[in-house]
Amino acid sequence: MEQIGFVGVNDKKDLLLNIAKILSKLNKSVLLVDATIMQRLRYIVPRVASTPTYVSEYDGVDVALGFMNLGQICQYLGTQTLNYDIVIIDTDNPQTFTSFALPNSRKIFYSTSYDEYELQRSLEILGVLRTPIELTKVIISSDLNNKHDEYLNHLLESFQVKWNSNIVQFPDSDRDRNANLSNQLIKQIDIRPYTNLYKECLEYLMSLMMEGIIEQSEIRKIIRRK
Protein backbone atom coordinates (compact mmCIF):
# COMPACT_ATOMS: atom_id res chain seq x y z
CA MET A 1 0.00 0.00 0.00
CA GLU A 2 1.25 3.44 -0.98
CA GLN A 3 0.06 6.43 1.05
CA ILE A 4 -0.14 9.87 -0.57
CA GLY A 5 -0.83 12.98 1.52
CA PHE A 6 -2.50 16.24 0.53
CA VAL A 7 -2.25 19.09 3.03
CA GLY A 8 -3.97 22.46 2.89
CA VAL A 9 -7.15 24.29 3.80
CA ASN A 10 -8.40 24.96 0.26
CA ASP A 11 -11.11 22.74 -1.24
CA LYS A 12 -9.38 19.73 -2.84
CA LYS A 13 -12.29 17.29 -3.02
CA ASP A 14 -12.97 17.50 -6.78
CA LEU A 15 -9.30 17.31 -7.69
CA LEU A 16 -8.77 14.27 -5.48
CA LEU A 17 -11.87 12.52 -6.83
CA ASN A 18 -10.50 13.06 -10.34
CA ILE A 19 -7.13 11.62 -9.33
CA ALA A 20 -8.71 8.61 -7.65
CA LYS A 21 -10.94 7.93 -10.67
CA ILE A 22 -7.99 7.97 -13.07
CA LEU A 23 -6.03 5.62 -10.81
CA SER A 24 -8.97 3.23 -10.74
CA LYS A 25 -9.02 3.26 -14.56
CA LEU A 26 -5.33 2.33 -14.39
CA ASN A 27 -6.39 -0.80 -12.45
CA LYS A 28 -5.28 0.53 -9.07
CA SER A 29 -7.49 0.02 -6.04
CA VAL A 30 -7.83 3.40 -4.33
CA LEU A 31 -9.17 4.68 -1.02
CA LEU A 32 -9.70 8.42 -0.65
CA VAL A 33 -9.76 9.53 2.99
CA ASP A 34 -11.36 12.86 3.86
CA ALA A 35 -9.63 13.76 7.13
CA THR A 36 -10.42 17.47 6.90
CA ILE A 37 -12.34 19.44 9.50
CA MET A 38 -15.34 20.24 7.27
CA GLN A 39 -15.38 16.87 5.46
CA ARG A 40 -16.96 18.29 2.32
CA LEU A 41 -17.04 14.86 0.68
CA ARG A 42 -19.65 13.83 3.27
CA TYR A 43 -22.12 15.97 1.29
CA ILE A 44 -21.06 14.61 -2.12
CA VAL A 45 -20.76 10.83 -1.73
CA PRO A 46 -23.71 8.62 -0.78
CA ARG A 47 -24.22 8.13 2.95
CA VAL A 48 -24.34 4.40 3.68
CA ALA A 49 -24.80 4.44 7.45
CA SER A 50 -26.22 6.57 10.23
CA THR A 51 -22.87 6.42 12.01
CA PRO A 52 -20.39 9.33 11.75
CA THR A 53 -17.73 7.01 10.27
CA TYR A 54 -18.22 4.99 7.10
CA VAL A 55 -16.70 3.99 3.76
CA SER A 56 -18.84 4.75 0.73
CA GLU A 57 -18.44 4.15 -3.01
CA TYR A 58 -18.71 7.06 -5.43
CA ASP A 59 -18.51 6.28 -9.16
CA GLY A 60 -16.05 3.46 -8.59
CA VAL A 61 -14.00 5.27 -5.93
CA ASP A 62 -14.04 4.25 -2.25
CA VAL A 63 -14.23 7.24 0.12
CA ALA A 64 -13.65 7.07 3.90
CA LEU A 65 -15.23 9.67 6.17
CA GLY A 66 -15.07 10.47 9.87
CA PHE A 67 -12.06 8.32 10.76
CA MET A 68 -9.12 9.49 12.86
CA ASN A 69 -6.53 6.95 11.68
CA LEU A 70 -6.02 4.02 9.32
CA GLY A 71 -6.52 1.52 12.15
CA GLN A 72 -10.11 2.70 12.59
CA ILE A 73 -10.75 2.16 8.89
CA CYS A 74 -9.34 -1.38 9.13
CA GLN A 75 -11.61 -2.05 12.10
CA TYR A 76 -14.63 -0.74 10.19
CA LEU A 77 -13.80 -2.93 7.17
CA GLY A 78 -12.99 -5.93 9.36
CA THR A 79 -9.45 -6.36 8.06
CA GLN A 80 -6.00 -6.37 9.61
CA THR A 81 -4.57 -4.24 6.82
CA LEU A 82 -6.03 -2.04 4.10
CA ASN A 83 -6.25 -3.96 0.85
CA TYR A 84 -5.75 -0.97 -1.41
CA ASP A 85 -2.91 -0.20 -3.76
CA ILE A 86 -3.08 3.52 -2.98
CA VAL A 87 -4.53 5.47 -0.05
CA ILE A 88 -4.92 9.23 -0.58
CA ILE A 89 -5.38 11.29 2.57
CA ASP A 90 -6.69 14.85 2.53
CA THR A 91 -6.18 16.88 5.70
CA ASP A 92 -6.34 20.46 6.92
CA ASN A 93 -6.15 19.43 10.55
CA PRO A 94 -3.02 19.17 12.77
CA GLN A 95 -4.62 16.26 14.63
CA THR A 96 -5.30 14.07 11.59
CA PHE A 97 -2.03 15.16 9.98
CA THR A 98 -0.38 13.42 12.91
CA SER A 99 -2.80 10.54 13.52
CA PHE A 100 -2.67 9.43 9.87
CA ALA A 101 1.13 9.69 9.98
CA LEU A 102 1.26 11.93 6.93
CA PRO A 103 4.98 12.65 7.35
CA ASN A 104 5.56 8.97 6.53
CA SER A 105 3.67 9.19 3.23
CA ARG A 106 5.33 8.26 -0.05
CA LYS A 107 4.65 11.77 -1.34
CA ILE A 108 3.10 14.83 0.33
CA PHE A 109 1.54 17.72 -1.57
CA TYR A 110 0.78 21.15 -0.15
CA SER A 111 -2.22 22.77 -1.85
CA THR A 112 -3.10 26.47 -1.67
CA SER A 113 -4.51 29.40 -3.62
CA TYR A 114 -2.30 31.79 -1.57
CA ASP A 115 -5.37 33.00 0.33
CA GLU A 116 -4.19 34.52 3.61
CA TYR A 117 -6.51 32.36 5.70
CA GLU A 118 -5.13 29.24 4.01
CA LEU A 119 -1.55 30.32 4.57
CA GLN A 120 -2.05 31.13 8.24
CA ARG A 121 -3.88 27.86 8.86
CA SER A 122 -1.01 26.00 7.26
CA LEU A 123 1.21 27.27 10.06
CA GLU A 124 -1.03 25.43 12.54
CA ILE A 125 -0.95 22.21 10.53
CA LEU A 126 2.76 22.13 9.76
CA GLY A 127 3.67 23.43 13.20
CA VAL A 128 3.35 19.89 14.57
CA LEU A 129 6.39 18.75 12.58
CA ARG A 130 9.44 17.76 14.58
CA THR A 131 11.49 16.33 11.74
CA PRO A 132 11.89 17.71 8.19
CA ILE A 133 9.55 16.58 5.41
CA GLU A 134 9.51 17.33 1.69
CA LEU A 135 6.43 19.01 0.25
CA THR A 136 5.47 19.64 -3.36
CA LYS A 137 3.40 22.76 -4.00
CA VAL A 138 0.07 22.47 -5.80
CA ILE A 139 -1.15 25.99 -6.58
CA ILE A 140 -4.78 26.63 -7.54
CA SER A 141 -4.54 30.04 -9.17
CA SER A 142 -4.49 31.63 -12.62
CA ASP A 143 -1.83 34.09 -11.49
CA LEU A 144 1.38 32.62 -10.12
CA ASN A 145 2.94 35.70 -8.55
CA ASN A 146 6.48 35.35 -7.26
CA LYS A 147 5.64 37.67 -4.38
CA HIS A 148 2.94 35.27 -3.19
CA ASP A 149 5.35 32.37 -3.34
CA GLU A 150 8.06 34.33 -1.56
CA TYR A 151 5.58 35.21 1.18
CA LEU A 152 4.65 31.54 1.62
CA ASN A 153 8.31 30.57 1.82
CA HIS A 154 8.90 33.33 4.36
CA LEU A 155 6.04 32.13 6.58
CA LEU A 156 7.40 28.60 6.66
CA GLU A 157 11.13 29.28 6.63
CA SER A 158 11.52 28.30 10.30
CA PHE A 159 9.38 25.17 9.91
CA GLN A 160 10.55 21.63 9.24
CA VAL A 161 9.64 21.90 5.55
CA LYS A 162 11.77 21.30 2.49
CA TRP A 163 10.16 22.33 -0.80
CA ASN A 164 10.42 20.03 -3.77
CA SER A 165 11.66 21.89 -6.85
CA ASN A 166 8.54 20.85 -8.79
CA ILE A 167 5.48 23.10 -8.64
CA VAL A 168 2.08 22.19 -10.09
CA GLN A 169 -0.15 25.15 -10.95
CA PHE A 170 -3.79 24.48 -11.80
CA PRO A 171 -5.79 27.19 -13.57
CA ASP A 172 -8.66 28.67 -11.61
CA SER A 173 -11.00 28.95 -14.59
CA ASP A 174 -14.77 29.19 -14.91
CA ARG A 175 -14.84 26.20 -17.24
CA ASP A 176 -13.04 23.96 -14.75
CA ARG A 177 -15.27 25.13 -11.89
CA ASN A 178 -18.31 24.38 -14.06
CA ALA A 179 -16.90 20.91 -14.75
CA ASN A 180 -16.71 20.33 -10.99
CA LEU A 181 -20.33 21.43 -10.55
CA SER A 182 -21.50 19.31 -13.47
CA ASN A 183 -19.84 16.20 -12.03
CA GLN A 184 -21.47 16.84 -8.66
CA LEU A 185 -24.86 17.22 -10.33
CA ILE A 186 -24.68 13.97 -12.31
CA LYS A 187 -22.91 12.08 -9.48
CA GLN A 188 -20.11 10.99 -11.79
CA ILE A 189 -16.41 11.72 -12.25
CA ASP A 190 -15.89 12.81 -15.85
CA ILE A 191 -12.52 14.31 -16.85
CA ARG A 192 -13.54 15.23 -20.39
CA PRO A 193 -15.19 18.64 -19.72
CA TYR A 194 -12.08 20.15 -18.13
CA THR A 195 -9.75 22.50 -19.99
CA ASN A 196 -6.67 21.14 -21.71
CA LEU A 197 -4.51 23.12 -19.29
CA TYR A 198 -6.24 21.50 -16.31
CA LYS A 199 -5.68 18.06 -17.86
CA GLU A 200 -1.99 18.83 -18.43
CA CYS A 201 -1.61 19.89 -14.80
CA LEU A 202 -3.48 16.78 -13.65
CA GLU A 203 -1.19 14.58 -15.70
CA TYR A 204 1.91 16.29 -14.30
CA LEU A 205 0.67 16.04 -10.71
CA MET A 206 -0.13 12.36 -11.08
CA SER A 207 3.22 11.66 -12.70
CA LEU A 208 4.88 13.10 -9.59
CA MET A 209 2.59 11.08 -7.32
CA MET A 210 3.13 7.80 -9.13
CA GLU A 211 6.77 8.19 -10.12
CA GLY A 212 8.30 4.73 -10.37
CA ILE A 213 4.89 3.03 -10.22
CA ILE A 214 2.93 4.22 -13.29
CA GLU A 215 4.43 5.66 -16.46
CA GLN A 216 3.33 9.20 -17.33
CA SER A 217 2.38 8.00 -20.82
CA GLU A 218 -0.18 5.62 -19.28
CA ILE A 219 -1.65 8.43 -17.18
CA ARG A 220 -1.85 10.62 -20.29
CA LYS A 221 -3.77 7.96 -22.22
CA ILE A 222 -6.49 7.83 -19.59
CA ILE A 223 -6.78 11.59 -19.17
CA ARG A 224 -6.91 12.21 -22.93
CA ARG A 225 -9.38 9.41 -23.60
CA LYS A 226 -12.51 10.74 -25.29
Image: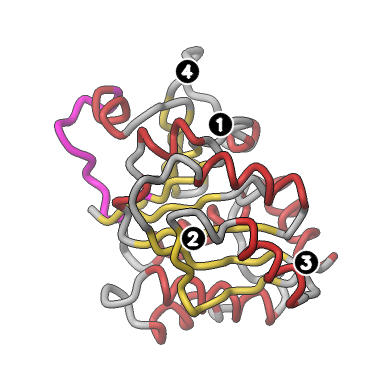
Around disc 2, counting alpha carbons within 10 Å, would you say few (fewer than 14), some (14 to 19), or many (20 or more)?
many
Q: Which mark is residue 49?
A: 4
Say what amino acid the circle numbered 3 marks.
Asp
| Marks 2 and 4 close (CB-CB < 8 Å) | no
Say what amino acid the circle numbered 1 marks.
Pro
| Nearest-to-viewer mark from 1 and 2 | 2
Tell me residue 84's x, y (percent): 26, 49
| Nearest-to-viewer mark from 3 and 1 | 3
In this rendering, position of residue 91 left or right of residue 178: left
Q: Which residue ends up furthest to the front in the rendered image? A: 158
Magenta span dominant secondary structure? loop
Q: How many marks?
A: 4
Q: Which mark is residue 172?
A: 3
Say what amino acid the circle numbered 4 marks.
Ala
Q: Which mark is residue 178?
A: none
Q: Quadrant of the C terminus?
A: bottom right
Mark closest to the chain's N terminus, 1 or 2: 1
In this rendering, position of residue 34 left or right of residue 23: right
Query: In the figure, residue 170 lies in which quadrant?
Result: bottom right
